[in-house]
Structures are given as C-alpha cells and as structure tokens.
Amino acid sequence: MPAYNAQTTLEQTVADIPSGCIDEIILVDDCSRDETVASARRLGLTVIQHERNLGYGGNQKTCYREALARGADIVVMIHPDYQYDSRLVPHLVGLLRTGHCDVVLGNRIRTRREARAGAMPAYKYIANRALTFVENLWTGQNLGECHSGMRGYRREVLETIPWQANSNDFVFDSQFLVQAVHFGFRIGDIPVPVRYMKEASSISFRRSVTYGLGTLGVLAQWTLHRLGLARSPLFESRPARTAAVGR
C-alpha cells in the first residue's frame, strides 16, 4: 500500500481484505501529515516511512523492493484510500497464482453508468476512456482501464521490468504497463466498483493533464525504442539474477 494521508480510509481498506488470502501487508508512508503511520501500526501492518516525500512512483518503488526482499511470489498493490474494493484481492491473486495472467488490473469502468454512479468526475471518465483506447490500440491490448490503482503482479514481472528507472511521479504506472507489454507479459483485468469520495485521493485537473501527456510520451518513447531510433533504459533487460525462494 503506497500511502499518503490515508488515516481516515486505511482501516476500512484493510478490514475488507478477506482473511487468509495474503501473508503480509506492507504500507509505505510517503511523509503523511496525518496519523496514517500510527493507524497502520495499530492494525499490525508492516510500516516503512520515507524520510522525505518521494512521490507516488517513488513510493511504489519502495513497496516493491520490500515485497521482493521479503520473498513474495505475488504482489498486489492497492491504494489505501478505499476507492478500490479490497474484497477482490483474492480474485486478482487467483488469476496470478494459476498462471492465467502475469499482471492483473482492477477495471473501474465496466460501464459508463456504473463509473458515473460511483461519482467518477466526467472529465476523468472521458480522459480515462480516451487514454485507454489509445493505449490499447498502440500496445495491442484489450483492457477496460489502464489507469487503475489496484494491480497484481507475479514475482517474475517485478524481477524482469526495470521499474527502478521509472519516474517517481504518477506516470510510473503508465511506464510499468507499457514495460509489461514490451517484455511479453500477459495482462488481464477484473471489474472493480468505483468509489469517488472526498476522503479518496485524487489528483487535480492540472496534474491529470500532465499525467495524460506523460502517458502519451511513454508510448512515443517505447515506439522509438522498438524502432531503434532512441534507446531507453525503461525497455532494456535487467541484469540476470538468481531467483529468490518464494513463500
């Protein structure tokens, strides 16, 4: 759980995770200004605190480093802001454990009616659909949403993709998804109810525009790399390493 000011929603998110489907919950706090850390410790989570704010992507990097170091075979990333239904965690895990998928995303946009009923702002809905259409067309995927904050990965994915070279900002997610396509991993999704509320984290319109342009930039960067016109470290294979023993 990459966390920032999640005190009011953390307990609900954790409580909804079905018993027995996970081994450990790691929360990385990115210098929250509320009582997120105290709440996480009270709930018995493994808590890691950044000494300075590293941003959304930087937070995820710490999450994945810690999960791999602790021997995780499957890693599920979920925002602790209660926007995503954590009761679906075992379903993501099941698709990964059986080998049907290497990456699984939560799709908040099964229908326009459901997304809008969940209070997703109109501009976010339109931008999400438009960007997802472009990304699917560009990458050859058929995903319902490419911008979800609920994602599951097999260990091999995190050991293959050079995600440490990614941005520390929100475009980290777009980079990771295009990298997963580039390295040939199988990507799927499952429907997840959308819940927009004042307690849930949400970037501003201006940051959304920056994120959208950054996503298009990642697609262009990937294309240039594939054509051999401009090599990018985002799409270069990581050095070979000995696989760690999973749980």
Image (cartoon, rainbow, N blue to C red):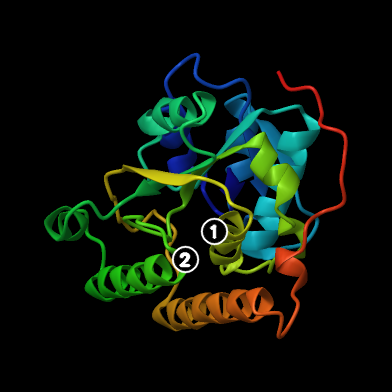
Image quadrant in which the C terminus is located: top right
Q: In the rendered structure, find residue 3 and report the number of the disc placed on it.
A: none
How many residues crowd mark 1 within 10 Å: few (<14), some (14–19), many (20+)? Answer: many
Q: Is residue 141 left or right of residue 130?
A: right
Is residue 36 visible to the viewer in this orientation of the structure? Answer: yes
Q: Is residue 226 above or below residue 87?
A: below
Q: Is residue 125 above or below residue 91?
A: below
Instruction: Residue at the far top: name it.
Output: 20
Residue indicated by mark 1: 177
Q: Residue at x 51, y 31 (%)?
A: 96
Query: Mark 2 to mark 1: distance in Å?
Result: 10 Å
Q: Amino acid at mark 2?
A: Thr
Q: Residue at x 44, y 48 (%)?
A: 81
Image quadrant in which the N terminus is located: top right
Mark 2 and 1 residues: CB-CB less than 8 Å, in contact?
A: yes
- Judged from the image, the secondary structure of the residue bearing numbered disc 1 is helix
Q: Residue at x 35, y 38 (%)?
A: 85
Q: Quadrant of residue 4?
A: bottom right
Residue 93 location (% of width, % of height) = 49, 28
- Judged from the image, the secondary structure of the residue bearing numbered disc 2 is helix
In depth, the one of 157 and 138 nearer the eye is: 138
Q: Amino acid at mark 1?
A: Leu
How many residues crowd mark 2 within 10 Å: few (<14), some (14–19), many (20+)? Answer: some
Q: In the rendered structure, find residue 139 and report the number of the disc placed on it.
A: 2
- Which is more foreground, mark 2 or mark 1? 2
Q: Quadrant of residue 203?
A: bottom left
Q: Is residue 137 left or right of residue 66?
A: left
Residue 127 location (% of width, % of height) = 32, 75
Which comes sooner in the sequence, label 2 or label 1? 2
